Image (cartoon, helix red, strand yellow):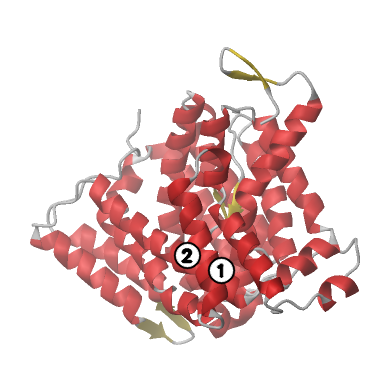
């Protein structure tokens, strides 16, 4: 890293150094940010644009105090895929805008009543299995894409695994990016990449924005999905606060950070992009580099916007073979399910209690089994229905689980 150090703290004595580190942070988040739109059928340039502008919106709402970068949320991949099949992408986007509004409502609740009311409704016993469903429900998608060329997908997967397990420093934080790079190079060698679209693309081109269309069924489908990322957001704010040695949940306040996340997500929906979320990879990079200056993350955001209007970049991303993406997903979707298990473990959920076994079992069965409830033109299924079932069971069955670790008010 090109930074002078004094007593272990980065010394930003020139704008050039901030720019270099800002671009470096974008590449930490780049792989995951563009992977989500590639999986759900959205122009990756749109995702870069909405992630960049969304990050700037977040910094504006949080008074420029919190060093975070907002990228595409993996929690919404399965819901977007399913909702798009049912309602089309424009209708699904109205659901994503509604998710942003839910974030805003929860932000107001936290401002007025504090975090405890959210912990009561969405404890680990509900959130953990829902996160597991998000990963497990996507397993068939990963396998179907990977099997288009098992050699390429296996190399991409192995690269990401080796990066995660055996490397150190900044390289350890970009396994997705490196897996895509190595898989793409192998695809070129094997003649699996068609460069025609890159040659025909303009150097400067606007992203392929999609206009949302109001669809109440899509809105009802998406809203319950919002609560797992909300809990994740709470944990992320405590994490980045610990790294920066500041209590961001107090200043600027958890209500502001969640509102910033919500407005950024609604903005993305208006322009046809995937929902945004705070990236743990970037938090890891901040912990590694000791760079906690929010201005650096704003530079990363501006760089993302610049990349989004370079037509050659967008065209290049569209040439990534399905097998490369499938190989990366074999790791990522399993890790998402693992995070759900980790959530239950860290909350010290007592699996000997029949109540807890019942909640977890029913939530998993409803979510993975594809259960659906319909009334007229409205329907609720998959992750959304599983989340609602989990909340209801948690409220009506006796006893309660412990809140998610790290989400206690202080």
Indicate which disc residue 95 carries. 1
Please determine whether, in this image, residue 186 is positioned above or below residue 6: below
Task: Name the spot of residue 290 as percent of width and height, x first.
Answer: 56, 27
Q: Are marks 2 and 1 in contact (CB under 8 Å)?
A: yes
Instruction: Report which residue position mark 2 lands on.
Output: 223
Taking the spot 22% from the left edge, 45% from the top edge, the residue there is 402
- The crowding category of the residue bearing disc 2, from other C-alpha atoms within 10 Å (few below 14, some 14 to 19, many at least 20), is many
Q: Which one is in front, 171 or 47?
A: 171
Asked whether 197 or 121 is in front, the reply is: 197
Residue 191 lies left or right of residue 78; in this view the side is right
Nearest to the observer: residue 314 or residue 85: 314
**Residue at x 87% of width, y 64% of height:** 205
* Label ID, residue 342: none
- Whether residue 58 is visible to the viewer of this picture, yes or no, is yes
Note whether residue 211 is visible.
no
- Identify the residue shown where x is 80% and y is 26%: 15
Residue 65, quarter of picture: top right
Q: Quadrant of the N terminus?
A: top right
In the drawing, does residue 50 fall left or right of residue 62?
right
Camera-side residue: 189 or 223?
Answer: 189
Position of residue 194 measured from the top left corner of the image (x, y, whole percent): 77, 78
């Amino acid at each position: 890293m090109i930074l002078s150090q004094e007593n272990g703290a980065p010394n930003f004595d020139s704008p050039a150094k901030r720019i270099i580190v800002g671009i470096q942070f974008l590449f930490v988040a780049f792989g995951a940010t563009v992977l989500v739109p590639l999986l759900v059928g959205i122009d990756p340039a749109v995702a870069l644009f909405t992630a960049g502008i969304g990050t700037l919106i977040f910094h504006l709402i949080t008074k420029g105090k919190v060093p975070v970068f907002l990228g595409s949320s993996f929690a919404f991949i399965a819901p977007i895929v399913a909702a798009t099949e049912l309602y089309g992408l424009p209708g699904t986007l109205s659901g994503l805008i509604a998710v942003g509004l839910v974030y805003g409502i929860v932000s107001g609740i936290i401002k007025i009543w504090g975090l405890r009311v959210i912990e009561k409704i969405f404890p680990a016993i509900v959130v953990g299995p829902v996160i597991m469903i998000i990963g497990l429900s996507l397993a068939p998608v990963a396998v179907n894409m990977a099997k288009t060329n098992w050699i390429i997908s296996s190399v991409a997967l192995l690269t990401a695994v080796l990066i995660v397990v055996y490397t150190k420093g900044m390289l350890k934080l970009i396994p997705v990016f490196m897996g895509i790079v190595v898989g793409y190079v192998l695809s070129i060698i094997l003649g699996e990449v068609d460069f025609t679209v890159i040659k025909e693309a303009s150097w400067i081109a606007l992203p392929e924005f999609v206009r949302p269309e109001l669809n109440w069924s899509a809105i009802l489908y998406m809203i319950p999905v919002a609560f797992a990322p909300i809990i994740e957001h709470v944990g992320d704010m405590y994490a980045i606060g610990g790294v920066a040695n500041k209590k961001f949940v107090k200043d600027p306040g958890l209500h502001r950070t969640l509102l910033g996340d919500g407005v950024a997500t609604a903005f993305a929906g208006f322009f046809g992009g995937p929902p945004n979320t705070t990236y743990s990879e970037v938090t890891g990079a901040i912990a590694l580099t000791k760079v906690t200056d929010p201005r650096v993350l704003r530079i990363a955001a501006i760089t993302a916007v610049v990349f989004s209007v370079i037509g050659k970049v967008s065209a290049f991303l569209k040439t990534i073979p399905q097998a490369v993406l499938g190989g990366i997903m074999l790791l990522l979707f399993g890790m998402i399910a693992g995070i759900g298990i980790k959530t239950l473990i860290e909350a010290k959920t007592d699996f000997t209690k029949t109540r807890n076994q019942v909640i977890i079992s029913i939530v998993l069965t409803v979510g993975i089994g594809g259960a659906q409830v319909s009334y007229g033109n409205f329907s609720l299924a998959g992750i959304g229905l599983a989340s609602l079932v989990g909340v209801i069971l948690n409220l009506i069955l006796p006893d309660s689980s412990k809140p998610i670790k790290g989400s206690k008010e202080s």
